[in-house]
Image: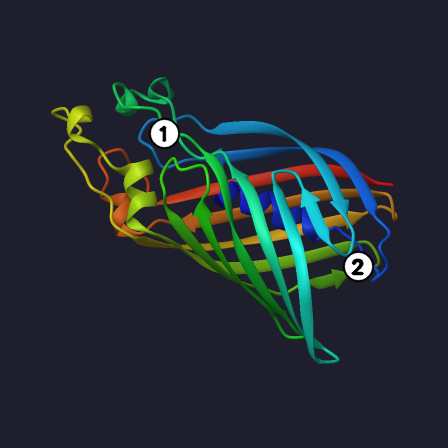
Amino acid sequence: MLAVGLCASVAAMGQEPTSESSSTTWGLGIGVMSEQEPYAGIDRDNTPIPLLEVENRYIHLFGPQIRFKLPGLDIRDSQQLNFGLVGKYDGSGYEEDDAPILDGMDERKGGFWAGGKVEWSSDLVDVSAEWLADASGNSNGQVINIGLKRTWRVGNHFLLTPHVGASWQDDKTVDYYFGVRDSEARIDRPVYSGESAINIEAGVRGVYMFDKHHSMLMGVEVTSLSDEIKDSPLVDRSTTNSVFLGYIYRF
């Protein structure tokens, strides 16, 4: 979920404001996501990601995420509340041959998550809250993401956005991805039942806009894992990290 969120949010920084008309903007590009997952002995995962962006007053589609826009609320000239329904594909999970510690484990699959999102934007800071549920039924879990970000324009072409956040995962989500079932236990991998957890995230995103058509996207994020995840016998790291680099052409 963290990788998907990073990719979508980095890309969103590069978009020009869309007018209230029903006109639709399009974008195509390619990106690479490099992730270090917390499982013991697992290699860093470098994944190419095709980028498709479609936006109008009703939807915003980018890569693995789509947001259906709901009517917003203007509080003041510089403050606004935006609401939306969100669906996204999450590529989390593993196969037993991904690392020695996972040998003999049943496959854990990613899936499609859906829910709602609210964003409060102001001149000082932007705050977002998002609730998602596993619509694929793999984990039957739920996630709540809360984030704060601030964007600075550097010169005429560069946008820089530091951000921090927290991600709450319920016990079903943690147990599915980090638990060990009775049938999977062995001497160096005892039974483990996951409990709900809160991870802390921080990072920075950047967009360099050569012109109105060509943009480079970049982002770095580090996540500090909760004890409920670090205590899993499958895990030997206290943090994970993601790096994203991409290019998009907007028509």
Choose between 153 and 122: the one closer to the eye: 122
**Amino acid of disc 2:** Pro
Left or right: 89, with 97 as reference point:
right
Return the x and y of residue 234 as percentages of the image width and height. Answer: 26, 33
Count of numbered circles in the view: 2
Whether 71 is drawn above or below 236: the answer is below
* N-term-proximal mark, 2 vs 1: 2
Q: Is residue 208 above or below residue 76?
A: above
Q: Which residue sits at x=80%, y=59%? A: 17
Q: Quadrant of residue 248?
A: top right
Name the residue carrying label 1. 108
Camera-nearest residue between 113 and 146: 113
Residue plotted at (83% across, 62% down): 20
Callout 1, which amino acid? Arg
Please give left or right for residue 246 compared with residue 163 in the image: right
Please tell me how crowded label 2 is: few (under 14), some (14-19), or many (20+) other residues with Cα within 10 Å: few
| Residue that badge 2 annotates | 17
Lateral position of residue 177 relative to residue 17, left or right: left
Mark 2 → mark 1, Cα distance in angstroms: 39 Å
